[in-house]
Amino acid sequence: MCGIVGYLGQRRAYDVLIQGLHRLEYRGYDSSGVAMINASGDLNIYKSKGKVEALEHFTQSKDLDGCIGIAHTRWATHGEPNDINAHPHVSQSQMLALVHNGTIENYNVLKEALTLHGYKFVSETDTEVVVQLIDYIMQTNGCSLFDAVREATRQIVGAYAIAVIDKSKPDEIIAARQSSPLVIGVGENNEYFLASDATPIIEYTNKVVYLNDGEVAIINHQTGLHIFDAHNTDESEIHITELKMSIDELEKGGYPHFMLKEIFEQPRTLADCISGRISSDAKSVVLSGVIENREKFINAQRIIIVACGTSWHAALIGKHLIEDFCRIPVVVEYASEFRYSNPVVNKGDVLIALSQSGETADTLAALELAKSQGAFVFGICNVIGSSIPRATHSGCYIHVGPEIGVASTKAFTGQVTVLAMLALLVGQMRGKVSEETLETVATDLRRVPTLIQDIFDRLNGKIEDLAKIFTYAHNFLYLGRGYNYPSALEGALKLKEISYIHAEGYPAAEMKHGTIALIDVDMPSVVIAIKDKVYEKTVSNIQQVKARGGKVVAIVTEGDEVVSALADHVLEIPAIVEPLTPLLTAIPLQLLAYYIAVNKGRNVDQPRNLAKSVTVE
Ligand code: M6R
């Protein structure tokens, strides 16, 4: 969590930093701050509780000069969100300013030791320990900032991406990373950008360098960029990656919220995701990461999928897809549980790490654990060059473009789409999927973008109206079965995270084992009742809800008359092969959550207490 930005060059650093903070605000918005060194050598630090806008307001009449600076947007872990705990943190000598993303696990021990050496701490953060430690090392060893940072990284335990500036060296930023992302943008004439992801950099340069774990970088306006291993004197080779991301993808494009833009982008994003991967005759699927590791998938004894949040819901759909098409047993684990559960991982296991951001700390740790135990590790991610794709043996991207809204929408459907293609391909390799089945499912997969557009055309206005009826409900139940039980979980999560209405996703048939006691006239149920193999059973479940006076919003297959007669409100989606139905049922669920949240006046793109990328435990 938290976003870091840095700049060194010829422009006014403040402008680059503020724009960068806006781009990274999705990573945390409890407080923000900037530190710049001006031409007279003053180190100016400005911090403010709340969003970046508050910082801009606060800095209006301040000295904002200087061509070097670092900045931070915070998602609080240690210490409440306030001005004092906001980054950048300054050293006791008043010479250094530092920003940090991550958590320092041994900060208490270090704090005690530094206190004995006369250091006084003003904040409650773990970060302040790092800047004081670097300061202490510089004072006692008389060494450079670079050497001190390198020494400090040997003493701190935890996850960090840090950027530090020294008032006495106004042409240099030192950066280091361990388990938290850091990207360096390389401009012309020794102009450099630094950020937690590439979004603040892309409008200036498409040339980036991804810092690796255990590396420390010197970014110097005269001598350029040099990267070293923190544990020895080896200089690393610099690999420049050219990004294809465009600035338009990072803007709202006329929509009131990123979330709505991203929902409506899905016909295009899924077309991009499928593009070049399903042949025009729909007879073959190509995922090079899978094909290159054919034997691993063919011989897999078991597939384990680790993920969190929405990605975990997509993983549950992936389990159905892989078990149906490949006949390989699949277990889906919360990454946070898996990593601490002493899991049994065998050499023949394939572990899939599923993550939009590619930075989720628990998912990254879970895959490292499985890798260390001999599993073949495959990543399915969205953010190109992020930590998970770089830690896995192989993988494939979902290619849905930057997802800025905290609530995941287009990434969810992208993940399900990739999992469907993977299941078809591996199933075919294992001889479990006939040519006919592959063609039928792949043909329907190619139709998904058009079918989603059809849902928008017919249902968007209707769902907006429906949302008005349910805006003031205090609780919601989301029910689904089979492929759409995870869809119910996802629908409930979408509503919870952006509207703050309590919602529970449940397997429809399980309801009668307890949850049914909650149903009354004030507790609406959203039921996914499409024509699948358990359709009749779901109809019975709806009857059980209706018999208790519950209101039912049903998502049904176009032309359904049975549920339409039973439910209070009906949303029709086009027919498609059952394994792909979650791609369509997701759409009305996303829109319903969105409009209810808007009606409640919520901050849809940046809901309270949340951040897009969860890089802490
Ligand atoms: O980047 P990831 O897919 O690993 O993120 C996992 C979750 O943090 C994420 O899906 C979260 O649940 C979303 N806010 C849900 O909309």
Image: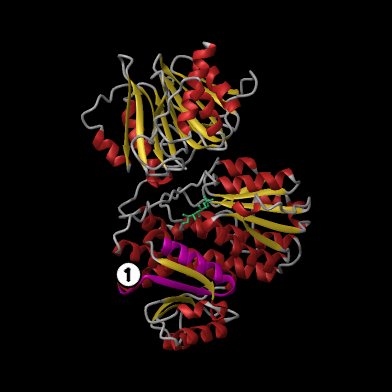
Q: Residue at x 34, y 62 (%)?
A: 597
Above/below status of 519 relative to 565: above
Q: Position of residue 142 (x, y in %)?
A: 52, 10
Q: Is residue 165 left or right of residue 225?
A: left
The relative height of residue 459 versus residue 303 in the rendered view (above or below) is below
Q: Which residue is mark 1?
A: 471
Count up the numbered dots. 1
Q: Could you tell me residue 27's position as x and y percent? A: 43, 44
* Vertical position of residue 291 compared to residue 77: above or below: below
| Residue 281 in view here | no
Tell me, yes or no, if residue 539 can be seen here. Answer: yes
**Which residue is painted at 25% across and 35% down in the image?**
58
* Amino acid type at image mark 1: Thr
Q: Residue at 71% x, 63% y: name it.
A: 428
> In the displayed structure, does residue 330 sit left or right of residue 219?
right
Please tell me which residue lies in front, 66 or 602.
602
Q: Is residue 470 magenta?
A: yes
Q: Residue furthest front?
A: 116
Question: Residue 454, percent across and down?
Answer: 42, 69
**Magenta part, dominant SS:** helix
The image quarter in which residue 323 lies: bottom right
* Left or right of 352, for residue 270: left
Q: Which residues are magenta?
A: 469-496
Q: Residue furthest left?
A: 61
User: Dot 1 surroundings within 10 Å: few (below 14), some, or many (20 or more)?
Assistant: some
Position above or below: 164 against 27: above
Give whichever of 138, 436 is nearer the camera: 138
- Magenta stretch contains residue 381: no
Instruction: Report helix, strand or loop for mark 1.
Output: loop
